[in-house]
C-alpha cells in the first residue's frame, strides 16, 4: 500500500482522522505521518480558520491588510495568514483587531481566565496594547493605542513617557 | 549527565504507578512561555537564540525543583543522541531536526523537561505515570511561578500568555493523557468513543512508537482549547472525560472476559509466547504484542510480568535506544534482531 499523501513511499502508519464528525482512514509513510501529527497537534483547523477570515474581509480592507506589519518584528500580516505563526509578543498588539476574531473562532472565547506571571498579579490590569512588557514598538498607531490604555488605567507616569515618544515621532 | 546514563534509568512516567495505571499509562502537562522582549524563535537570529538560551539556562539554575537536572545544547549532541531524547518523550522531533540555538533541560527521573527555542522560547513539560494531571499541574505551576520572577514573560491581561501559534494563546497549556484501550478496540467501540471525544473539542491521537508508527491500542487524549478557561478548569474537564473512558474500557474488558475467556486467554498467552521466543521482530509487531501482554497483566491472565517491565520495553526497542545499547550504528535488519534480543533478556528469567 502506498502513502496517501506523497504517493511514493510505503504506507506503514494507519491513522483514523475525525473531521466534522466524519471518520476517515489515512494510510501514510513514516515521514508524512510525522508531519501530519505535528499539524494535528499545532494547527488544529487553523489553516481553515485563516482562509475563512480572508474570505470574510471586504476588498477595501484587503489592500490595507496586505500592508499591515508588526511594529516589533516586522512580520507581515499576510505572512502570518500564510504560515499561521506570529513573530513576537508585539504582533499581538499590531494585529490585535484581526486576532480578536481569530482567537474567538479557535477557542470560543477571547478572554483569558487563567493564571498570570508573578510580577503581573500586583499590577494594574492592562488592556490589549497597553502592556509595557512586550517587545517595544515604535509604530505611531500602537503608541497612541498604548497611550489611551495607559490613561484609562490611570498609569500617568507611563502615559507621559508615551506622550513624549509620540511627540518625538510626529516631529521627526 | 551523559546520554548513555539514560539507558540504565527508568523515567518516572514508565513506572506503572499512580491512579488508574492499568488503563492510563501517563499524564503530561505542557506550558508554552515566551520572553516578552525577544522575537519568537522562528524570527530570531542565531545571536538572539544564543542570548535567550543563556538567559533561560541561568534562570533555570535557580529553581529548587530542578536541582541536579541535566542541560543539553542540541548542537553539541549527535543525531542518535538527539533521537534518543525524542524516543524518551523528552522533546519533539522538530527540536532534534534543527539543533541550532536549541537547548533541553531534563530533571531527575525525567519528570520535568524544558525545551528552549522550539516553536516558543520555553516549552515546559511535566510527565507522571497514571492519571496524575493535578499533581503534574502543581509541579509545573510552581516552576512557572518561580521562573516568572526572573524572566519577563509575554503576557496580556486580556489574552493571557502569548505564543507563536494562536491555537496555544491564553493558558498556553496542553494537558494530555496516554490511554491503553485494547478492549474498546477489540469490541469495535473505539471509533464511537473517539468521535464523542472530538465533539467535546478534545483531540485524540495514536501513540507513535518507532518514530511514528501508530497503534498498540494507545491513544493520547488532550485539550484543544486554551483560552477562556482556567488551567484547573481545563484539567478538571480532561479528568472527567478520562474517567468516563476508563469506565467504558473497564466494562469492555469485563464483557470480553465474560463472553469468551478461553479465546482471550489463548490470544494473550500466544502473544506472550511470541515475545519471549522471537529472534527477529519489528517495532510495530512488538508494540502490538506489548499491548496484549499489558491486557494480560490487567486481567490476571499473566502473572510473571509487571507493567514497569513492559513500559520500559516500549522505550528501549526504539532505534536510537537499540543503537545506544549496542554502541554502534545498526541497519533495519540488525535492529529487528537486537530488538528481539533486548525483549527476551527483559522477559525471560535468566537460568545462569
Ligand atoms: Zn508519504
Ligand atoms: Zn511581531
Image (cartoon, coloured by chain):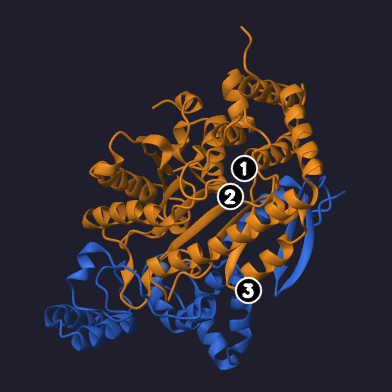
Q: How many marks overall?
A: 3
Q: Quadrant of residue A156?
A: bottom left
At x 33%, y 55%, the residue is B138
The answer to whether one can see residue B127 in this image is: yes
Q: As displayed, is residue B127 above or below residue A102?
A: above
Distance in Å between CA atoms under marks 3 and 1: 30 Å
Q: Quadrant of residue B58?
A: top left
Q: Nearer the viewer, mark 2 or mark 1?
A: 1
Residue position marked by numbered label 1 in the rendering = B298
Residue position marked by numbered label 3 in the rendering = B199
Q: Nearer the viewer, mark 3 or mark 2?
A: 2
Does mark 3's beta carbon lie closer than 8 Å to ligand 1? no
Distance in Å between CA atoms under marks 3 and 2: 22 Å
At x 56%, y 73%, the residue is A81
| Residue in the foreground of this view, choosing between B93 and A168 | B93
At x 31%, y 47%, the residue is B56
Name the outermost residue toward the right.
A1
Q: Quadrant of the C terminus of chain B?
A: top right
At mark 1, the secondary structure is helix
Q: Quadrant of residue A172?
A: bottom left
Residue A76 coordinates in the image, percent (x, y):
49, 72
Q: As displayed, is residue B131 above or below residue B106?
A: below
Residue A153 coordinates in the image, percent (x, y):
20, 84
In the image, the chain rendered in blue is A
The answer to whether one can see residue A40 in this image is: no
Q: Which mark is residue B327?
A: none
Q: Which mark is residue B23?
A: 2
* Other residues around mark 3 within 10 Å, as few (<14) / some (14–19) / many (≥20): few
Mark earlier in primary sequence (2, 1): 2
| Residue in the foreground of this view, choosing between B74 and B243 | B243
Amino acid at each position: 500500500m502506498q502513502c496517501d499523501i506523497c504517493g511514493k513511499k510505503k504506507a506503514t502508519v494507519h491513522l483514523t482522522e475525525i473531521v466534522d464528525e466524519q471518520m476517515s482512514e489515512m494510510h501514510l509513510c513514516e515521514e508524512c505521518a510525522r508531519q501530519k501529527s505535528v499539524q494535528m497537534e499545532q494547527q488544529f483547523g487553523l489553516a481553515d480558520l485563516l482562509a475563512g477570515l480572508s474570505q470574510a474581509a471586504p476588498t477595501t480592507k484587503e489592500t490595507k491588510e496586505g500592508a499591515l506589519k508588526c511594529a516589533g518584528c516586522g512580520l507581515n500580516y499576510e505572512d502570518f495568514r500564510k504560515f499561521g505563526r506570529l513573530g513576537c509578543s508585539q504582533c499581538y498588539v499590531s494585529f490585535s483587531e484581526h486576532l480578536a476574531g481569530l482567537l474567538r473562532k479557535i477557542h470560543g472565547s477571547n478572554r483569558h481566565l487563567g493564571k498570570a506571571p508573578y510580577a503581573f498579579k500586583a499590577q494594574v490590569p492592562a488592556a490589549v496594547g497597553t502592556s509595557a512588557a512586550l517587545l517595544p514598538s515604535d509604530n505611531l498607531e500602537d503608541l497612541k493605542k498604548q497611550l489611551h490604555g495607559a490613561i484609562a488605567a490611570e498609569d500617568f507616569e507611563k502615559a507621559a513617557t508615551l506622550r513624549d515618544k509620540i511627540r518625538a515621532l510626529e516631529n521627526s | 549527565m551523559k546520554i548513555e546514563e539514560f539507558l540504565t534509568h527508568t523515567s518516572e512516567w514508565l513506572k506503572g504507578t499512580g491512579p488508574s495505571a492499568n488503563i492510563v499509562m501517563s499524564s503530561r502537562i505542557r506550558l508554552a512561555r515566551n520572553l516578552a522582549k525577544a522575537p519568537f524563535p522562528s524570527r530570531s537570529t542565531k545571536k538572539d537564540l544564543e542570548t535567550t538560551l543563556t538567559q533561560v539556562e541561568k534562570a533555570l539554575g535557580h529553581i529548587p525543583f530542578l536541582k541536579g537536572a541535566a542541560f543539553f545544547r542540541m548542537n553539541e549532541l549527535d543525531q542518535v543522541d538527539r533521537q534518543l531524547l525524542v524516543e524518551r518523550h523528552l522533546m519533539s522531533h522538530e527540536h532534534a531536526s534543527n539543533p541550532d540555538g536549541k537547548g533541553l533541560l531534563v530533571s531527575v527521573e525525567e519528570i520535568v523537561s524544558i525545551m528552549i527555542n522550539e516553536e516558543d522560547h520555553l516549552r515546559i513539560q511535566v510527565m507522571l505515570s497514571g492519571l496524575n494531571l493535578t499533581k503534574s499541574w502543581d509541579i509545573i505551576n510552581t516552576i512557572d511561578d518561580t521562573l516568572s520572577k526572573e524572566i519577563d514573560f509575554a503576557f496580556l491581561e486580556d489574552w493571557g500568555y502569548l505564543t507563536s501559534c494562536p491555537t496555544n494563546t491564553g493558558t498556553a497549556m496542553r494537558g494530555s493523557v496516554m490511554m491503553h484501550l485494547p478492549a474498546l478496540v477489540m469490541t469495535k467501540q473505539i471509533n464511537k468513543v473517539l468521535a464523542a471525544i472530538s465533539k467535546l473539542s478534545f483531540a485524540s491521537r495514536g501513540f507513535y512508537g518507532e518514530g511514528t508508527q501508530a497503534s498498540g491500542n494507545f491513544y493520547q487524549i488532550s485539550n484543544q482549547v486554551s483560552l477562556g478557561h482556567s488551567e484547573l478548569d481545563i484539567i478538571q474537564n480532561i479528568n472527567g472525560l478520562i474517567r468516563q473512558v476508563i469506565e467504558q474500557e473497564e466494562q469492555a474488558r469485563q464483557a470480553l472476559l465474560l463472553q469468551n475467556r478461553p479465546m482471550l486467554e489463548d490470544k494473550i498467552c500466544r502473544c506472550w509466547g511470541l515475545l519471549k521466543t522471537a529472534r527477529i521482530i519489528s517495532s510495530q509487531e512488538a508494540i502490538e504484542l506489548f499491548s496484549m501482554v499489558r491486557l494480560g497483566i490487567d486481567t490476571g491472565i499473566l502473572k510473571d510480568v509487571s507493567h514497569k517491565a513492559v513500559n520500559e520495553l516500549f522505550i528501549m526497542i526504539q532505534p536510537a535506544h537499540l543503537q545506544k545499547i549496542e554502541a554502534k550504528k545498526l541497519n533495519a535488519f540488525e535492529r529487528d534482531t537486537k530488538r528481539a534480543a533486548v525483549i527476551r533478556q527483559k522477559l525471560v528469567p535468566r537460568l545462569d
